[in-house]
Amino acid sequence: MTELFLGVDVGSVSTNIVMINNKNELLEKKYVRTMGNPIKVLTKAMKEIGNKYNDNQIKGVGTTGSGRNLANIILGADIIKNEITAHAIAGINFTPEVRTILEIGGQDSKIILIENGIITDFAMNTVCAAGTGSFLDRQSQRLGIEIQEFGDLAIKSDNPVRIAGRCAVFAESDMIHKQQLGHNQEDIINGLCEALVRNYLNNLAKSKKINKTILFQGGVAANKGIRKAFEKYLGEEIHIPEYYDVMGSIGAAILAKEKFKKTKTTNFRGFDATNVEYKVRGFECNDCPNMCEVVEIIADDKILARWQDKCGKYSNYINSDDNLA
Amino acid sequence: MKITFPHMGNVYIAAKGLLEDLDREVVLPPPITKKTLDLGTKYTPESICMPLKINIGNYIESIEKGADTVLITGSCGPCRFGFYASMEKKLLKELGYDVNFISFDPPEGNPKKLLNEVIKATGTNNYFKIMKAGIRAKKLLYATDELLDYSNYKRAVTIHKNKVDKIMDEFYSRIEKTKGIDEMNSLIRSSYNKLKLIKENKKDNLKIGIIGEIYTIIEPFVNLNIEKKLGYMDVIVDKALTPSKWVSHHLGIGQIGISEEKKKWKKARPYLKALVGGHGRETVGSAVIYAEEKYDGLIQILPFNCMPEVVAESILPSVQRDHNIPIMTLIVDEMTGEGGYQTRIEAFIDLVKKRKESQNDRIIFRG
């Protein structure tokens, strides 16, 4: 029987699930929009996969993304990894000679530098959304075009309009000015792509040496305009892996596979676990002025986990290995 | 007279002990919470650095608890901390709080003014008494720092991390009700002994040095409990700046030229010869020293738009390259969402761990 491994990446914009075998071949790939409801999206996608496979084929589960702990509670993960490491593992697996990974997701963007298959440096932006997918999403809406067409339109232009890319708010007003001056849409879109890339390189890649081979991962890699802009500014060829949009979950699956090699067991709660109805309840703790908004997950009237309390009063109660008062 | 002062890591313990030994009544500001930050951001200029915002929050909360005198220390470093005392005075006055101010500004040719302020704060002009209490308070400060460092170490090397948390939580809740240096010392000793009993069962821990701006390094609310987070990842941490180190530089051997601070300046020389304000030069020097001491990685923490640390930040990549040590910078601000920080810290520890493993592999190969 083949050994299968699940990788789950619960991100802010999309939730991705992949299944690989022990040769790291991709058997299943799901890319769904999170739509602010990760639990529903995740259980639905898992049910669809559960129809084709049975529980004891699954030998390991890895979770990543900003919702990695949530995914762990629902699925029972063997490894919970941050998305930076997960992206790097996947990139190295498909392209062993990779030196630089550019990753642009929905809410954050990252740069990862690699030497001899080991991460040597990384940077991640969260303070500013100017260099992320959400910004492009928003601007394409404003211009009234589908985000899928965005890249194709951009590469039609030879004459990008210069748009300030430092800040999303400035970029937007700058763009409107240029639009009102009568520049054509392709040039504006191309200008936006270049602004985003400039922002990325100035903010994240500053003082970092970008060596080839360069990989471009994350949902935004589908945008040809951004790829072209990167190639223009870096003067190097940019490679886009085949499964660029689910690299994080592939990384998580690979890590789960490696864990299984050592432990030979899995925490996977089975596909049936996705049939349970999960309820999330939030309450404000008023014991101190921090007023933490504690979140708890309930299934079958049992509290599975609590988090978000600064003092650990609620989360320790569930997770502690020894009894706390 | 009911004296209060801003929070800064553990300093409140020694300050409280000192004043209480001199028979002054102390009103401790409540522990820093979101409310403190909200008050601070509401009443301070938007672009000022974060420590001032929290100071103002502390004062307001203390005044609500009954404090009528605010004790502020000045500084000579050319960074915005230099005008904290005057600015805070002005802000509180504008807000309509009728309180007294005592500020310990550096003497700068007018030692009499500082002495007058000291007499106002301590309520006595018996210098011998003040000196004696000062020395005892300094020892208390060292002991508190030692306890904190020891708890961080223990958290990293044990699997019973909850027990460490529990002992420290209890310590912090009891210290507020303890009066005077003697009682405080005995509480520290008993907590230390409790920590000692916890079994150590992890070896080959990673060692990470924390460098950067002093307030953000030592105030756990501001740095999102980084020491605890790293402890839970089995990482041993060392801070480049602690209240003890600061005191020993400014009120001790620092003045005669053999202190740690002077050593840091020397190490920073190839990169930064001049004073850039705050602890910018020290941050660069500490990074070099940690690298030479074979630490596995460094984390720099600074409040958003802290000028001296921004200078240091732009120099650190050169230190990273020359000394072959990973360095990550975390900028803290009013954000209380911890997700992004957690991700970056986890990824950084992964990086450092993998790097160490591969270095060890290479050594074995050669051997």
Image: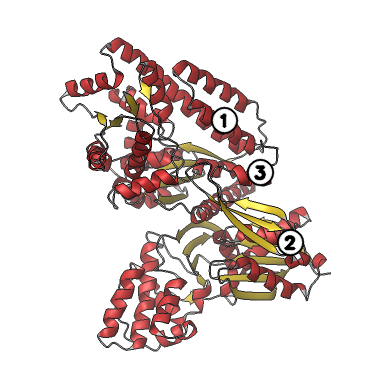
Asked whether disc 1 touches disc 3, contact meaning CB atoms under 8 Å apart, the reply is no
Q: Residue at x 70, y 41 (%)?
A: A321
**Visible in this render: residue B258?**
no
Quadrant of the rendered structure where residue A187 is?
Answer: bottom left
| Marked residue chain, label 2 | A
Could you tell me the amino acid type at mark 1? Answer: Glu
Quadrant of the rendered structure where residue A180 is?
Answer: bottom left
Along the viewing direction, whichever of A203 and A319 lies nearer the viewer: A319
Q: CA distance from mark 1 to mark 3?
A: 17 Å
Q: CA distance from mark 2 to mark 1?
A: 40 Å
Q: CA distance from mark 2 to mark 3?
A: 27 Å
Residue A87 x/y as whole percent: 57, 64
Residue that carries the numbered disc 1 in the rendered image:
B170
| Marked residue chain, label 3 | A
Label 3 environment density (alpha carbons within 10 Å; few <14, some 14–19, many ≥20): some
Q: How many marks?
A: 3
Along the horizontal axis of the image, is A288 left or right of B116?
A: right
Secondary structure of the residue carrying tag 3 is: helix
Along the viewing direction, whichever of A258 and A316 lies nearer the viewer: A316
**Visible in this render: residue B249?**
yes
Residue that carries the numbered disc 2 in the rendered image:
A60
Label 2 environment density (alpha carbons within 10 Å; few <14, some 14–19, many ≥20): many
The vertical placement of A286 against A244, above or below, is above
Secondary structure of the residue carrying tag 2 is: strand
Q: Nearer the viewer, mark 2 or mark 1?
A: 1
Quadrant of the rendered structure where residue B3 is?
Answer: top left
Residue that carries the numbered disc 3 in the rendered image:
A317
The vertical placement of B14 against B320, above or below, is above
Residue B349 x/y as whole percent: 55, 49
Could you tell me the amino acid type at mark 2? Answer: Gly
Along the horizontal axis of the image, is B287 left or right of A323?
A: left
Along the viewing direction, whichever of A37 and B47 lies nearer the viewer: A37
